[in-house]
Amino acid sequence: MVVDTIRTLKLLSKWGANMAVGRRRPVIAVFSMTHYCNFYCPMCPFGDADKEGQIVLARRKDLTTEQWKTVFDKVSSHCVWSIIEGGEPTSRPDFMELVRYLHSKKMPITLITNCSLLHTIDLDELKKYIQFVTCSIDSVFEEPYCKVRGVTPQTYRRVMDNLQLLTEHKVPHYFNSVITKYNTQEFIDQTYFDRAKELGANAVSFTFVEDRSDVDYSLLPDRETMNKVCASILDYMGKKKEPQVMIPPEYFQQILQDGRGHFDECGVWKSIFVNGNGTVMVPCWKFNSPENTYSLLEHSVDEIWSAPQWDIAKTCHDCEVLGCIWYSSQPVTTFARNYMRGLGKMISKERPELAEAV
């Protein structure tokens, strides 16, 4: 699918006009399709060990197919890009129906998945509707992968096989890794990059884990190890080898120098993050309370983005190393120079017909 450039330009013009009068609105849509995930990642709230209870929760709280379509209708008039994630989005029986519908709204789609269920999906059909698959591959080696993700070696091998399927079906994909104390060595010795290339990834992206406030353990590496990771990734980026690192070097430079990323004001408002039950937490998940939670089935995007709680984002700097928050809070020039260049390089290899649109 060729990106609808005219639609994108119109929405960006609308977004710019809102900004000019001080009216902030989202430009990226993130749809958390379900409360269920078949993995046990300790850094993620969907990694709950009680999977039977999680299935019950998903059946009770997940939006229906028609409700998600209503949400897509509302959000598509604002956002230039969409991201489908979870829980594990491919676990929904109506996954492909929802992808088709979102595609019909002319919303370019990125799918974020743990890749364990891709063998159950028609990948040739999927690539008609999405731009990229973001593969959550925290480690490319069996032992640390299983430790970070809380899964068996059999699951690891299934994921590796499914990555091969993506390559065989020519589905554009890149890897994203959350760096925890369990998987630092492969970034320090740079073996992650060679293995990622072998597995078909032309680009990779990273973030250090941001420890959850609702648990009594830390997954963040110690400062000395973080510095080694940052120095090694910066060294790799300087070599300009493939796979391309999609997050800007400034992220790693700032953590190396000061132990955290820098931004003047949190940019979380630039994305609308819709939970599996259709709610939006304002300004973000760290402020999860009834008074900060709005249903997108009951309210418009304009109503939610006019809520007073967004003022919290002007002064909140709680997220010290979370890459997505750091990224959204950077100047537009940083985003354009690094992210679009990275995507452009990947697209030119996987889908040359899209290169000009990006």
Image (cartoon, rainbow, N blue to C red):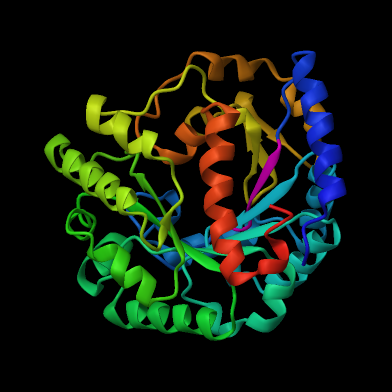
Q: Is residue 31 magenta?
A: yes
Secondary structure of the magenta portion, mostly? strand
x then y, percent, for residue 329: 52, 28
Side of 33 relative to 320 (left or right):
right
Q: Nearer the viewer, residue 267 or 338?
A: 338
Residue at the (57%, 30%) spot, across then down? 333
Q: Residue furthest left?
A: 224
- For residue 319, which quarter of the picture? top left
Q: Quadrant of residue 169?
A: bottom right
Residue 91: x and y in percent read 58, 71
Q: Residue furthest front?
A: 239
Q: Tell me where the magenta segment starts and ends, as one range.
A: 27-34
Where's residue 69, x and y in %? 82, 56
Horizontal relation, residue 110 to residue 261: left or right: right
**Residue 273 placement: quadrant:** top right
Residue positioned 20% across, 71% down in the render: 143
- Where residue 342 appears, as percent x and y from the top left, is 52, 52
Q: Residue at x 27, y 79 (%)?
A: 153
